[in-house]
Amino acid sequence: MNDFSFAMLMPMMPELFLAVSGMLLLVLGVFHGDKSSSAIGWLCVLAFAVTTSLLLQNSWVETKVLNGMFVMDQFAGVLKLLILAGLMVSVALSIRYIEDEKMARFEYPLLILFSGLGMMLMVSANDLLSLYMGLELQSLALYVLASIRRDNVKSSEAGLKYFVLGAISSGMLLFGASLVYGYTGSTNFIVIGDTLAAGLSVGALIGMVFLLAGIAFKISAVPFHMWTPDVYEGAPTSVTAFFALVPKLAALGLLIRVLFEAFPTAAMQWSQIITILSALSMGVGAFAALQQDNIKRLLAYSSIGNMGFALVGLAAASPEGAASILVYMTIYMVMTAGTFGVVLSMRRNGVALENISDLSGLSRNCPSSAYALAILMFSMSGIPPLAGFFGKFMVFKAAVGAEMYGLAVFGILTSVVAAYYYLRIIKVMFFDEPVPVFEKGAPFVRRLVVGLSVLFVLVFVLNPSPLVSISRDAVSVFFNG
């Protein structure tokens, strides 16, 4: 009986290991205090690496445990690998930053760890209850991270705004879940899908809309984006980097699973909603960023626009569209990691800088950072043959394949508009008069992240097939049945 129970828990072994590691490190931090924050940070990175090893040893054949509430399959496996990679990069980038900013606390890396645990549970959720538990475990940690700098008014304001608006979105999601349960008699995605296949009810569709609204908040899709610029600006830059890197990937993975497993028969209805969210996000992301002077606010609107591009693939409601989202988000995550690696190095006289004008003349003061950021900005704007172009090409190709020509054309037009503010950063770095140089001595990890990001962006076009193939295999779990 014990062997059977252990075997049943094998699909959850990465999550169980991460949870136990987090609790042990929490005890260690309590005994050693904030002076152990750096050591606990690197131990968290080690925990993520071991979790990755456990995940790779796990069978990715579809397996359900906890009465079908938790599913481990190829889609969850691929997303968890990306999440763990993002978590490792986020913690590694932040360790030196929080020391420089005199905000080193042992809880910081642990909050990232527990939010990562929530994300891993989210992408394996196969039930409305496990969906909500994973989402809230992630969100509660993020609220605290946003306001972790208690002596800073902007950080406290960011955390409060995020918490209040997040609570509203959670309420909408729960209301939608209760409606879906009321009209289908189940919280299990597969049972909901089978029930709705026999006939779509208006109540269940309304519940689906509320579910979509709740998840749309997590990915900052317009019109549920209002928290993003303020939280990105107010939170410490290392926290902003984490927000931009990982949570939206997990929320998009959750959204894909919910729509393709619980509501496949309502594809015509939810595709229209996703199309509207996508178009609004691309438009607001492109035009609202034009007047931004704070680079973190600019990157916030950039992330809103990028979520709009990713949703183009989801609106297509096809295998090709779902695969294009994974390709796009992987590329976006790498580009964002490199960009924030440079932004975190923007320091002068011990003060972190955030304005675009602070980059003036960077090409003469620090050519390596300037050229790295220029390559990443060209990629984000979709200039061929860089990786960012290929990501956009994939989602637009999926939209054209689904005969959504209007959405694809609108996406291309907003991409052209968005190119202005990316190119503006390049113009400031290469053509404006130099300002005093940034502090020297960026840590090795930060330089490594930037270097690998630039290398990926440059060479991806030489052989994009492995990522495309992995993405197609991952989403095939939703279409083979």
Image (tube, rainbow, N blue to C red):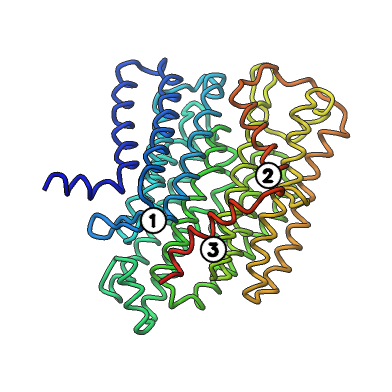
Residue at position x 32%, y 78% from top? 195
State the residue position of label 2. 298
Tag 3: Cα neighbours inside 10 Å, few (<14), some, or many (≥20)? many
Is 243 drawn above or below residue 103 in the view shown? Answer: below
Tag nearer the camera, 2 or 1: 1
Compared to residue 77, the image places residue 157 above or below, namely above
Residue 450 percent across, percent down from the top left: 66, 32
Along the line of sight, which residue is nearer the eye, 298 or 307? 307
Marks 1 and 3 close (CB-CB < 8 Å)? no
Mark 1 surroundings within 10 Å by alpha-carbon count, few (fewer than 14), some (14 through 19), many (20 or more)? many
Which of 442 and 461 lies nearest the eye of the viewer?
Answer: 461
Amino acid at pointer 2: Leu
Residue 345, image quadrant: top right
Lateral position of residue 128 relative to residue 149, left or right: left
Q: Which residue is mark 3?
A: 322
Q: Nearer the viewer, residue 177 or 153?
A: 177
Mark toward the viewer: 1 or 3: 1
Q: Considering only order in the chain, which callout, 1 or 2, is on the residue closer to the N terminus? A: 1
Q: Residue at x 65, y 49 (%)?
A: 301
Disc 3 on helix, strand or loop? helix
In this view, 158 is above or below 314: above
Q: Quadrant of residue 221?
A: bottom right
Q: Which residue is mark 1?
A: 73
Who's the residue at 77% across and 56% down the image? Answer: 417
Instruction: Please tell me whether mark 1 sits on a helix, a strand or a loop.
Output: loop
Q: How many marks?
A: 3
Task: Name the side, left or right, on which 284 lies relative to 365.
Answer: left
Q: Quadrant of the C terminus?
A: bottom left
Q: Residues within 10 Å of mark 2 (few under 14, many from 20)?
A: many
Q: Amino acid at mark 1?
A: Asp
